[in-house]
Amino acid sequence: MQDYRPSREDKFTFGLWTVGNPGRDPFGEPTRKPLSAPYIVQKLAELGAYGVNLHDNDLVPIDASAQERDRLVREFRQALSDHGLVVPMATTNLFTDPAFKDGAFTSADARVRAYALQKVMHSMDLGAELGATTYVFWGGREGTEVDAGGKLLDALSWFRDSLNFLAQYSQDQGYGYRFALEPKPNEPRGDIFLPTVGSALGFIATLDQPDLFGLNPEFAHETMAGLSFPHAVAQALDAGKLFHIDLNDQKPGRFDQDLRFGAENLKGAFFTVQLLEEGGYDGPRHFDAHALRTEDEAGVWAFARGCMRTYLILREKAEQFRADPEIQAALAAYRVEDAELAELTGKFSRENAQALKSRTFDREALGRRGPGLEHLDQLTLELLLGLRSPVQGAPSARIEARG
Ligand code: GCO
Ligand code: MN
Ligand code: MN
């Protein structure tokens, strides 16, 4: 049993806007004092985090002078090097300023669209200066409340043009960014464009340089859409598009809650960790959540510690799952393999198709078979509840990393 203390190798990251969230909501003023960026860096380093991510305006206020910008960036870089933290991901705030109230890349006003491009280019410069290699696009304001404006088709092509432009800007500057789209179904807009992982994957295929673009799926966002986060993560992994990940938690059917990772849907969190650990993802484990509005600063650090600790506990549970003979036996019993049929169905040929068509299947027997999922799921639950003792030295069934 380990002590669940995170280390840099675990690659845990937080946004400046997450632990820095002062507890404002649509009904109430902030409940906590703002924390400076260098202080956040120091605290996260003490807790064992690997890095910190940011929007341009988390560090540099939107109306800062050039001098003020340079000072803030210098102090932030100093803190990063003093405390050994990195900035793996950067992004742009395209949602707070009233200029973006009807969208940024998808605003019906060409001047807003151009200003959005300008703002992102400056923010990409800042991210590159800080060493970021992943650039996230979360289109929080890209959407509508009413569709009377008739911009649905145009909005998608404006969005596409903007992403194509910015990918070329990155290449022209030699920044080498990989871009991660972050889907969300609603909030702050009534309906946000590209609302789910599936929609974003479909859209990426229409870009000029699809290889540069992937996903930054978020637990809460797929949950808000009534979808399964592990299923979304699996689809992104399968497509080779899991470029980044936003871990948090969320009750279905609610406003955007950004709960501490694992706070609500523990099984969903477990299967997410299992996929990340065994599915070949080696990027940062980023927590995009914040402490409850009820909390003081101590609660903020308890929140951050809790996110990482829960991840490590679930990672250990995934190891136990692989080593547990009864679970492995139930898994083996669940799958039925047949070498001869694999040969016939694995690759099309006229002969294989003919052989398959003339084959007799015992349909009733297929329908009678019980796959044992109730038993397997109960074993999983008891493992998560701590009722199954860790098995030492059992063979690992780690699945191969996907390329
Ligand atoms: C949200 C989003 C944001 C983005 C962030 C990075 O629901 O507000 O998750 O937190 O992740 O803007 O792009
Ligand atoms: Mn979110
Ligand atoms: Mn997010």
Image: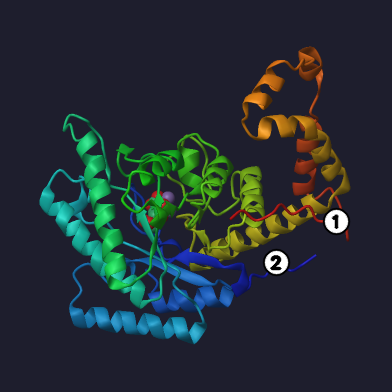
Say how the picture is coloured.
rainbow
The answer to whether residue 95 is visible is no
Task: Determine which quarter of the picture holds residue 200.
Answer: top left
Residue occupying image coordinates x 71% and y 52%: 399
Give the answer, above or below, for where 67 lies relative to 267: below
Expressed as whole percent of the image width and height from the top left, the position of residue 112 reads 15, 53
Estimate how packed mark 1 is, as few (under 14), some (14 to 19) or many (20 or more) residues with alpha carbons within 10 Å.
Answer: few
Horizontal side of residue 33 vs 383, given as left or right: left
**Marker disc for residue 103:** none
Q: Position of residue 44 (x, y in %)?
A: 52, 73
Q: Nearer the viewer, residue 165 or 19?
A: 165
Give the residue pinned by disc 1: 395
Residue 398 as seen in the image, left or right of residue 51: right
Q: Is 303 above or below relative to 324?
A: below
User: Mark 2 belongs to which amino acid?
Assistant: Tyr
Disc 1 marks a residue whose amino acid type is: Pro
Q: Any atom of ligand 3 within 8 Å of the CB at mark 1?
A: no
Label 1, secondary structure: give it: loop
Camera-nearest residue between 357 and 134: 357
Q: Which residue in the structure is indicated by mark 2?
A: 4
Query: Circle 2: is it few (<14), some (14-19), or many (20+) Cα within 10 Å?
Result: some
Farthest front residue? 351
- Of circles 2 and 1, which is in front? 1
Ligand 3 within 8 Å, label 2 CB = no
Kindly state the secondary structure of the residue where label 2 is placed. Answer: loop
Is residue 175 rendered to the left or right of residue 244? left
In the image, is residue 173 above or below residue 104?
below
